[in-house]
Each structure stands twice: as C-alpha cells, then as structure tokens.
Image (cartoon, rainbow, N blue to C red):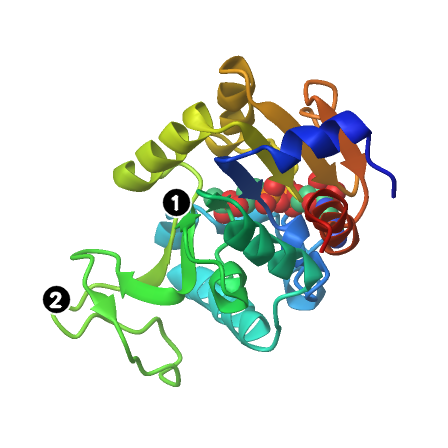
C-alpha cells in the first residue's frame, strides 16, 4: 500500500498519537469480530442479546457459558502483526495512548504498556453483586459459579450494553483523544458509543484522523485519511513508511 507523502510527514512529527482499536485488530489472530456471525451453538444469538445485564438476569448460565467459550478461544490465540506495530509506535513517539474496545488482552500480551481497556478484560471474573474479583472458581457444577464472599453470581469483568464504562478509563480516553495530534481508528465498526465519538473529539481539536479498516464505516468519510485493508498488513506498512523501520 502507498501512503500520501504529506501523511507520512505529518506522522513523522507526531508526539502524542492515540489509537482506538476494535475487534478487527484481533481478527487476524483468529478471533471473530463482534458483528461477524457467531458460530455453532451461538449462531442463533446476536452479541447484543448476550452481552447485557438483562440477558444475564434472564439466563445467567447461558451468558456465563458464552463467555467461558470466548475465554477459551482467547487463551488459544496470540497477538498478530497489527498488535506488534502498535507496540513499535509506542516505542517511537514520546507519548502514545492505546484505547481498545477489545476484552481479549492481546495488546498487553504483545507488549503495549499504556493501554486503556475501555470494555474490560474477559480473563478477569468478578462478583455481579459485591464486585469482588475471583481468581479461581469451580466450572464443573453445571451452574454459574458463586462469589466466595457473598454468594453472588460470578460474571466476566467486561462492560455490557447498557452499562456505564469505568469513569476514570473513559475520562482518560476522552482526555487523550482531545489532546492528541494524530488519531488512528483501527479495526472498529465505529458504531458503539462512547468509543466511536473519540475520533470526532480528536478531529474537532485539529488532530489528523487516520482510519484503517477492512471495510467502510461511518467514520470513513469523516477521517482525513482512510485505508481499506487488514490491520495486520496495513499498520506494519504504515509504521515502516513513517519511521523507516
Ligand atoms: P465490530 O465487529 O463491530 O467491527 C469490527 C470491524 O473490524 C469491522 O468494521 C470489520 O470490517 C473490521 N475488520 C475485520 N477484520 C479486520 C482486519 N483484519 N483488519 C482491519 N479491520 C478488520 O467490532 P468493534 O468495533 O470492536 O462491545 O465493536 C465495538 C464493540 O461492540 C465491542 O467492543 C463490543 C461490541 O458489541 C461490548 O461488548 C460492550
């Protein structure tokens, strides 16, 4: 892929870039994106119908099992070239903030340090009542494991539809987007708020907005530059073009 010389020059001078990532970044690691069809047993469900407090209240075992299935899927995969390109950017610029909607932990596994996991992390499990984190639980009882402290049902420490994001995380993400000089939106459909609005916050404050996504999104026409492609291919090429790596 070729990149416009003026973009390369702009990015070479960036001191405070921000990247927002979504499920597309983990696709090349072998994880399905959210709006892909679910497979097998889960084909009949939409993620919105599984990732919500109402769904958990209605059928906690179904939701626990869906996350247990995803947790196992995540354990079996490794970061890809897109994740590693973001690790490189963090090393190359004075200040880099990586904001992710992904709950898979692959950015940290790749070596990124300054990561805001806006939607939580699937490997963490906590009580749905008293918020106590659980390190171990018994998965063989045929029902949802319970908190050892209060007896409440355990759940993944992720943000579900209709739930508020952690305030400090969101404030840090908004601040980073407002203060950045370049904003990358990578592998996200850009339809879930408040994450989707971060690119616009950056753009309104004068940052150059660069999208890398496999298909067009609502942001594509608003971004300063939009590249259609896989993040695991396009991002390393961009890093190479900008920083001569
Ligand atoms: P989506 O599944 O909505 O979008 C993934 C995007 O990645 C799509 O636009 C794909 O075209 C694109 N894509 C797929 N493969 C790609 C690749 N190899 N390289 C680049 N792009 C690729 O996932 P998110 O935008 O992350 O929230 O979804 C946002 C949030 O909605 C999720 O965090 C989750 C969800 O439902 C909660 O669970 C609260």
Task: Check disc 2: other Cα within 10 Å, few if <14, some if 14-19, many if 20+.
Answer: few
Ligand 1's quadrant is top right
Task: Check disc 1: other Cα within 10 Å, few if <14, some if 14-19, many if 20+.
Answer: some
Q: Quadrant of the N terminus?
A: top right
**Which residue in the structure is indicated by mark 2?**
150
Tell me if I can see residue 181 in this picture: yes
Give the x, y percent position of residue 96: 47, 44
Residue in front for this viewpoint, 28 or 85: 85
Q: Is residue 40 above or below residue 118?
A: below
What kind of element bears circle 1?
A: helix
Could you say which quadrant of the image residue 19 lies in?
top right
- Identified at 71% across, 56% down, the residue is 245
- Identified at 80% across, 30% down, the residue is 5
**Which residue in the structure is indicated by mark 1?**
54
Instruction: Say whether residue 1 is left or right of residue 226.
Output: right
Instruction: Say whether residue 177 is left or right of residue 186.
Output: left
Could you say which quadrant of the image residue 232 lies in?
bottom right
Residue in front for this viewpoint, 40 or 9: 9
What kind of element bears circle 2?
A: loop
- Identified at 68% across, 23% down, the residue is 223
Tell me if I can see residue 166 in this picture: no
Mark on residue 217? none
Residue at mark 2: C-beta within 8 A of ligand 1: no
Give the x, y percent position of residue 143: 36, 74
Total of numbered circles in the picture?
A: 2
Instruction: Say whether residue 94 is left or right of residue 149.
Output: right
Give the x, y percent position of residue 155: 34, 61
Farthest-out residue, right: 1
Farthest-out residue, left: 149
Q: Is residue 228 above or below residue 5?
A: below
Q: Earlier in the sequence, mark 2 or mark 1?
A: 1
Q: Give me the C-alpha separation between circle 2 and circle 1.
A: 21 Å
């Amino acid at each position: 892929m070729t990149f416009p010389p003026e973009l390369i020059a702009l990015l070479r001078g960036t001191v405070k870039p921000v990247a927002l990532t979504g499920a597309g970044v983990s696709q090349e690691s072998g994880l399905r994106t959210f709006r892909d069809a679910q497979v097998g047993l889960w084909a009949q469900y939409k993620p919105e119908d599984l990732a919500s407090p109402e769904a958990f209240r209605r059928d906690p075992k179904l939701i626990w099992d869906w996350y247990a299935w995803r947790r196992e899927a995540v354990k079996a995969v490794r970061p890809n070239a897109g994740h590693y390109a973001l690790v490189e950017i963090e090393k190359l610029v004075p200040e880099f903030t990586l904001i992710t909607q992904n709950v898979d932990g692959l950015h940290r596994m790749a070596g990124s340090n300054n990561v805001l996991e806006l939607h939580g992390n699937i490997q963490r499990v906590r009580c749905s009542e008293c918020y106590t984190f659980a390190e171990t639980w018994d998965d063989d009882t045929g029902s949802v494991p319970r908190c050892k402290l209060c007896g409440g049902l355990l759940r993944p420490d992720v943000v579900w539809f209709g739930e508020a994001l952690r305030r400090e995380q969101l404030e840090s993400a908004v601040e980073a987007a407002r203060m950045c000089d370049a904003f990358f939106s990578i592998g996200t459909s850009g339809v879930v708020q408040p994450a989707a609005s971060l690119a616009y916050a950056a753009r309104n404050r004068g940052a150059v907005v660069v999208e890398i996504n496999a298909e067009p999104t609502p942001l594509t026409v608003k971004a300063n530059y939009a590249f259609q492609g896989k993040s695991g291919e396009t991002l390393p090429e961009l890093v190479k073009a900008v920083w001569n790596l």
